[in-house]
Amino acid sequence: MLLMVLRKISKVLMALVMACSTLCWADCHTLDLSVMIAKDFMVVGAKGGFSPNIFYTTLSDRYGKRYVTLHCESADDPGRIMWALYSEKNGVLDSVIVDKNHKMYNAVGLGEGGIMPPPLKKKLKLRSDNVVVAPLSALDEVAWNLVELRKQAEDRLDTNDILFVLEPNGTREEFLQQLRSYKPLVQAAKNAGFSFFSFGLMNDADSSYGDWAKLSKDMYDAVGLEMPSQDELKKHKRCSCTPGNALEAAPATPYSRGVLEILKGVGNPQKSDL
């Protein structure tokens, strides 16, 4: 029953998205990359569509406390840990290893909860002592999605812009502390060539968060960025019909049609079997 409800929500969401896309992108030629981060999943939005949810949990391993991706087959599935091949330098994870098509070497873990690593190293033709199998970082998966989506729309005017839409949680300081933990994602995006970042909240924050101008400054500081000027913000004005607007109308689900398919113009989500 829950699965059927989520599928109906997905249909409504995608209908809203496509209506939004038809009205909006005829007037503005933008990509509108967005990253929404909620307490248990992350999702990337672009051109009125959404990637499948990246469900995650917090895990402490030899590489420290990290957000790791969970493979979930339904809304009530507790999930299993996803693993990936990483290069390692001086005992620290360096980067996710990809194949010639820039696809990650990843797989669901073995055993209950996916706590045991799958035999991913067998997929590599060349072996190296600097290659390890480690739980896939949800932040690395988001960064990978951002790069792949940009490749599909290099003619857009805003391909180096990202809007982070965050879910307020706890006190103001707890929220900012949580935001600091996303700094590796911002750094990975900068390393990939993204150069303009903006922030938004999914809903109104508690009044204890203070005024928006001060909160905005603190949010940029939390991830090591300099807050842009008002003139700079105007230059990077987003399309009025953004993924964030659709998210307010209906939640993203793991069954949402992928952004890559929307960018490529494949199929009609309103006639989807979802």
Image (spheres, rainbow, N blue to C red):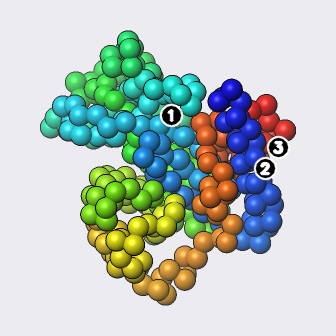
Q: Secondary structure at mark 2?
A: helix
Q: Nearer the viewer, mark 3 or mark 1?
A: 3
Q: How many marks?
A: 3
Q: Which residue is mark 1?
A: 103
In the image, what residue occupies the spot 55% across and 76% down?
236
In the image, what residue occupies the spot 65% across and 70% down?
239
Image coordinates of residue 243 in percent, x first then y, are 63, 58
- Earlier in the chain: of badge 3 and badge 1, it is 1
In the image, what residue occupies the spot 45% across and 56% down?
167
Which residue extends farthest bottom?
A: 231
Image coordinates of residue 73 in percent, x first then y, are 56, 25
Q: Residues within 10 Å of mark 3 (few under 14, many from 20)?
A: some
225 lies left or right of 82: left
112 lies left or right of 44: left
- Could you tell me if the residues under marks 2 and 3 are in contact, i.e. CB atoms within 8 Å? yes
Q: Residues within 10 Å of mark 1 (few under 14, many from 20)?
A: few
Tag shown at residue 15: 2
Tag shown at residue 270: 3
Tag shown at residue 167: none
- Earlier in the chain: of badge 2 and badge 3, it is 2
Q: Residues within 10 Å of mark 2 (few under 14, many from 20)?
A: some
Vertical side of 101 occupied by 166: above or below: below
